[in-house]
Amino acid sequence: MENNKKWWQNAVVYQIYPRSFQDSNGDGIGDLNGIIQRLDYLEDLGINAIWLSPVCKSPQDDNGYDISDYQDIDPMFGSLDDMERLIAEAKKRNIRIMMDLVLNHSSDEHRWFLEAKKSKDNPYHDYYVWRDGKEGELPNDMRACFGGPAWEWVPELGQYYFHQFSVKQPDLNWENPKLRREIYDMILWWMDKGASGFRLDVIDQIAKEPDQKITCNGPRLHEFLRELSKETFRKGDLITVGEAWGSNTELAKLYSNPDGSEFSMVFQFEHIGLDQQEGKEKWDLAPLPFLKLKEILGRWQQALYGCGWNSLFWNNHDLPRIVSRWGNDGEYRVESAKMMGTLLHGMQGTPYIYQGEELGMTNVKYDIEEYRDIETCNMYKERIAAGYDKEDVMKSIYAKSRDNARTPMQWDSSENAGFTTGTPWIKVNPNYTTINAASQVNDPDSIFSYYKKLVHLRKEYAVFVDGRFTMLLPEDENIFAYTRENEDSKLVVVCNFFDKMLPMPLKEEVEGMELLLGNYGEAMEAEILQPYEARMYLKK
């Protein structure tokens, strides 16, 4: 397998949400020049690629996931020149840039859609999904993800257009080969500019068939993806990851086939919906079923071994902070943040670190007026109108709002956490005075230093990349433990997932092995696992 390894198989990717990372011009919004200023920090962490959340031109109805020009940068982030400079400066530090592409829908302000609305005969009309109808009589009862119907009436055409997300995000019609060609040419243009990879937003929804109420995994999905890859990605040495909420392990084998016919990997979310009530929305909270978490992660590790590739993540711009969600952001914040990192980075796949995760940044509790996320604000209005208790609604928001991940990066203890000299677009988490990068980069016991070691280990030992995964203690309700084994090494990872002391159950398994990493350092007792203790053992 050694010779077939792709660069992204032992890489670690760092996700940046640009508006919250670093502001360079005092307008309160992070930008590309701000990212350039912080590249040395990322080089120090040791990451190999940056996934940039969308920076293309956009009216920002959904934080940039509504693109009005795929071949320009939104002025709030800078210019095309700034983007080219970021790619060049990152390259000097051996860091590649992955862009976020939204190919399921565009903004309603994109020139294609402006043309499409002019008449049914316009050559761009068929770039979108339309149905004839009468005002007030919807084509069907499909709902949009952000609330309301999935159909919007355009009186001048006497037609409805389909939108799975906001009304300002009309769905693109992938059935149209001309549209597909435009998309491929745009991707090749970015590759020519030096982009080294792409994350494909809700890509499993491009083959929708609204008349059959099919949004995910439509019949032509893999045909479209194979054509996309052949016309673009396979012409370069890229990392590509599809966001696929509807994926299972069988579909993921198609998506991440080692022959490169589709993507390098997908983001799957089976583990992400575990702490919500069955059949309900993410806001309907439930305790984490720990054994189910183990079963899911273990199954994905086993199923894709040798025939696909996993993406490994706890956090992203849409998810709450993992240390607050399934760790402990109080007394054991440092220990639980390190434990969650250990558990993830020991598995097979490409790990993604979301900005601030390497510092143990936490969720926030704001007043409703201080939230900025469209999904959060809509849910609040809907649930209050439906008679839900305000305290319960706020509890759901504290736990699950996307804004938990979007508060400004905490660089230091100066005003606004060193993020901006202006007024930040969203309030800074008040705990920035104690949780920040400046206090951690030179502290050998910090979460940052621990993550640095995790990143380094993946490059040092091949077993992290190609070792076979075996779950240990599958029925243990407190401990997440597993082995990774290749021809010349064995890795054992043991994590106490909770805040209690436990006897160490795997003494024989780790006998004679080297302790590679542990989050209790000198305070470790071989016989006892401390709250949220994590250990990695290696035998060569």
Image: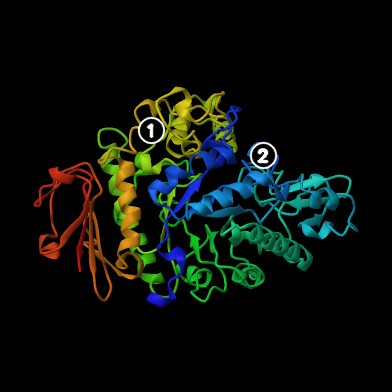
Q: Which amino acid is tagged 1?
A: Asn
Q: Residue at x 59, y 41 (%)?
A: 32
Pinpoint residue 352: horizontal percent, then vertical percent: 43, 53
Callout 2: helix, strand or loop? Answer: loop
Pinpoint residue 320: horizontal percent, then vertical percent: 44, 41
Q: Residue at x 55, y 67 (%)?
A: 237
Q: Residue at x 40, y 50 (%)?
A: 314
> Sequence order check: which comes first, mark 1 or mark 2?
2
- Name the one closer to the observer, 18 or 316: 18
- Name the one closer to the observer, 510 or 363: 510
Q: Are marks 1 and 2 in contact (CB under 8 Å)?
A: no
Among the 4 quarters of the image, the one containing residue 459: bottom left
Q: Which amino acid is tagged 2?
A: Asp
In this figure, which residue is indicated by the disc labeled 2?
61
Pinpoint residue 132: horizontal percent, then vertical percent: 83, 55
Residue 215 visible in the current orientation: no
Pinpoint residue 504: horizontal percent, then vertical percent: 13, 54
Quarter of the picture holding the C terminus: bottom left
Vertical placement of residue 56 versus 491, above or below: above
In this figure, which residue is indicated by the disc labeled 1?
436
Q: Residues within 10 Å of mark 1 (few under 14, many from 20)?
A: many
Closer to the eye: label 1 or 2? 1
Callout 1: helix, strand or loop? Answer: loop
Q: Residue furthest front?
A: 92
